[in-house]
Amino acid sequence: MAGTAATLLAVLLWSFHATIGDLTVQNISPMQLTVKAYLLSSVLLVLLAGMSRTPVSSCLRDLGKPLFLALCASGPVMMLYYLALYQGMSKAPAVDVYIIHYLWPVFAALFIKMFLGRTWGHKGLLSWLFMLMSFAGAGIVIMGGGSSVLGSGSFTGYAMAAVSAVCGGLYLPSLVAAGDKLTRIGYAEHAGFLMPYLILIAAGLVSLAVMSPAGTWQANLQAGSLTGTLFVGLGIIVAAEMAWVLGVRWNRSQSTAALAYLTPVFSTILLIFISKEHVHPHSVLGIALIVGANILMQKTRKAGHAGRYTS
């Protein structure tokens, strides 16, 4: 019961992500949103690690240098997952951007197989067919805009959504490997998540410090952007991620993991009613293909590995 409740909490938070992100980038830049959300999430994660008495020094020692360096390299990639998504929303219709962004499980399948040698879902030709089905859905979303896509800033927004999707799959292997190693040698589930995730966030903050102007770090936020920044930093980057990981690990159920694929559907509905986004028929077809392909791709995955780390 606790696992299902945690999973549903994650899905609820993620469902509002597109709408709140879209509204927030109308008031502040995507870079400002990412920087301030990362600062908030890092503070909360440090507090959680302290309150849970996570043994930081022993976790770092037991992770080992290769995994530590892999996490440090993956931190900027995870940061780009968020930054590119918000950049896309600022330049193209948020509905379409979020649909294309949801190609990340396809790239997760590729990178998990490539770096960890694990099968994410179906094997062989069937897996490739489902991947092509997802890409076809994204293509329909993009080309559905017709010539207006190439003649406007929307093309840049779609490209940023694609970057977000790639990065969403690319940072996962190090996080999965680090979490599995810590829990396998006896650390609690929360420690297996918190310590690797803290390293990812810290590395992302360092990359943000290098690439963003000094003014981006100023604390002044208007009321319209403050709520969105708090939601992304605390609700999405920390609460949703942790609720999902712990919920799936507690339940170890494919049906529970499959709840994540309700997220883009709920997100689209919320964008329509809250952000007043217009949805074209091609967007509906695109989301059906992408979500359907993801569900089919992971249908036979073992429950013990089902969706352990997603966002």
Image (cartoon, rainbow, N blue to C red):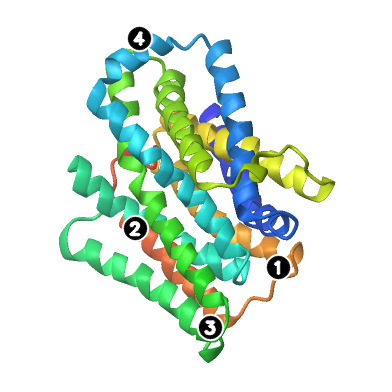
Circles 4 and 3 in contact, beta carbons < 8 Å: no
**Amino acid on which the number 2 mark rests in the picture:** Val
Single out the mark in the foreground, 4 or 1: 4
Chain-order first, disc 4 or disc 2: 4
Residue on which disc 2 sits: 106
Number of marks in the image?
A: 4
Report the disc number at residue 272: 1
Residue 154 drawn above or below residue 33: below
| Residue 287 x, y percent position in the rendering | 50, 69
> Quarter of the image holding residue 5?
top right
Chain-order first, disc 2 or disc 1: 2
**Amino acid on which the number 4 mark rests in the picture:** Ser
* Image side of residue 224 versus residue 41, left or right: right
Residue on which disc 3 sits: 149
Quadrant placement of the N terminus:
top right
| Residue 91 x, y percent position in the rendering | 60, 69
Residue on which disc 4 sits: 58
Residue 279 drawn above or below residue 80: below
